[in-house]
Image (cartoon, rainbow, N blue to C red):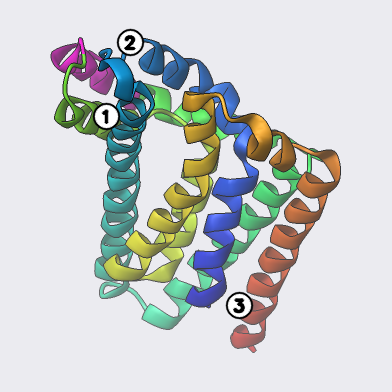
Amino acid sequence: MIEYNVGGAFLVGLMGAAHCFGMCGGLIGAFSANIPNSGTNQLANQLTFLLSYNLGRITSYTLAGAFVGASASALGQLFDADTYLLVLRIIAGIMMICTGLYIAQIWSGIVHIEKLGKILWRYLQPLTRKVLPIKHPRQALLAGMVWGWLPCGLVYSTLTWSVASGSALQGGLIMFAFGLGTLPALLAAGVAAKTLANWVQMKAVRLLSGLLLVLFGLQTLYIAFSQLN
């Protein structure tokens, strides 16, 4: 199951580009506009800061995935492990289907999950002031780690897959793959390279990718329910 969960997580990040632009495009654009000028090597300098920023964000995703995966494993020791993991996989399958429907632009109910994260973000947001203004890639890395906790329905949906994985390693890998998937879109937003960004937002591409995730979700549910018998 982990093999296509990691691939599916990467696909969610890649094909969720429209959502990434809506949630983080303005943030990354403002960040790019305030990167210190390095003269003739401005493009290389910009990429260094953007990569540091995104590395911090992906690190937070990975840590979150590892944490929920480890927590699920620990709770599994208190309950019937087989039944417990099956229930988690059913939930993950449902969330995978919901994510696919969102990416395919068929149903966007998953965005309501973001409301749950606004409570946590209220406490984390003041931390960003401690690394501003950003003058060094290390500060960009720390800012990105805070940014990684920004409320996002796609992140929370993919985290359910990490929970269902039942281990810290697999949970971290799933969220790392998701973070890598979001990287092209947000780098494109930062350097204004729109070719890939435009491609992933094409209706046919989004529909195909979304339906592929729906199939992943259905397969997850089929495997889980077949194990109940």
| Circle 3 SS class | helix
Horizontal arrangement in the rendering, residue 218 relative to residue 168 (left or right)? right
Q: Nearer the viewer, residue 119 or 78?
A: 119
Tell me which amino acid carries mark 1: Val
Please, what is the three-letter code of the amino acid marked with disc 3?
Ala
In the rendered image, the vertical position of residue 106 relative to residue 66, given as above or below: above
- Residue toward you, 121 or 172: 172
The image quarter in which residue 110 lies: top right
Q: Residue furthest bottom?
A: 229
Residue designated by label 1: 146
Q: Earlier in the sequence, mark 2 or mark 3?
A: 2
Give residue 145's position: percent from left, percent from top.
Answer: 26, 35
Mark 2 lies on residue: 34
In which quadrant will I find the C terminus? Answer: bottom right
- Residue 54 horizontal/vertical position (percent): 35, 37
Q: Residues within 10 Å of mark 1 (few under 14, many from 20)?
A: many
Magenta residues (range): 120-133
- In the image, is 94 to the left or to the right of 77? right
**Circle on res. 224:** 3
